[in-house]
Image (cartoon, helix red, strand yellow):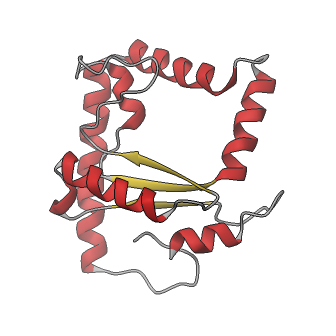
Amino acid sequence: RQANLLCARAGPHAHAEHPTVLCAFTTETYVDVTVFAALWRDVQENLAGQSIVLLAFHPVRLDRGPGCFPDEPHDPGHFTVRSPLPTLQLLRKCDVDEARLSWEKSKGGKGALGLLLENKDSLRALGSSELSSRMHKCSQLAADTSLELTQHPAEPRDTPTAM
């Protein structure tokens, strides 16, 4: 449902008030990264043919993309795909394409790969210990917020919300 709402706003040069959807999962179900990966694959299959880019973040996910070392679980570069809670992000493809072009222009043609590698370099400069500490603090905040939300649910609203 959220993907359909997002696609409806994906016309060229469309400037939606909410051009992305974040789905953060607070239940224990998706703590296991393999269970979360199955969900990720299912959502990806359901989005086939739509103008949506799906990104997945998990507290212990290992990045297997360019510039990472998949055999080194403590490589700070893995934090590009990590978040305090298992999270799926849906973005309009037109927004991703526009951001890539803007980055490429500002960096003299380095493109999206340049952005990715620069991000990983920045994370490595911070180091695994610092990033783990920050992730732990965010996890604590997320847990506290989740508890508060279950005790005091938000009022219904007509803007898209997470799953």
Q: Is residue 75 above or below residue 46?
A: above
Q: Is residue 97 left or right of residue 3?
A: right
Nearer to us in this view, 138 or 67 = 67
Residue at x-position 65% and y-position 60%: 19
Q: Is residue 143 above or below residue 96?
A: below
State the image coordinates of residue 64 (x, y, percent, origin top left).
36, 27
* Res 127 → quadrant: top left
State the image coordinates of residue 22 (x, y, percent, origin top left).
47, 59
Q: Is residue 31 left or right of residue 148?
A: left
Q: Is residue 161 above or below residue 32?
A: below
Residue at x-position 17% and y-position 62%: 29
State the image coordinates of residue 9 (x, y, percent, origin top left).
71, 68
State the image coordinates of residue 70 (x, y, percent, origin top left).
29, 21
Tell me how many marks there are. 0
Residue at x-position 51% and y-position 62%: 47
Q: Is residue 111 above or below residue 9?
A: above
Residue at x-position 36% and y-position 60%: 42
Q: Quadrant of the C terminus?
A: bottom left
Nearer to us in this view, 8 or 82 = 8
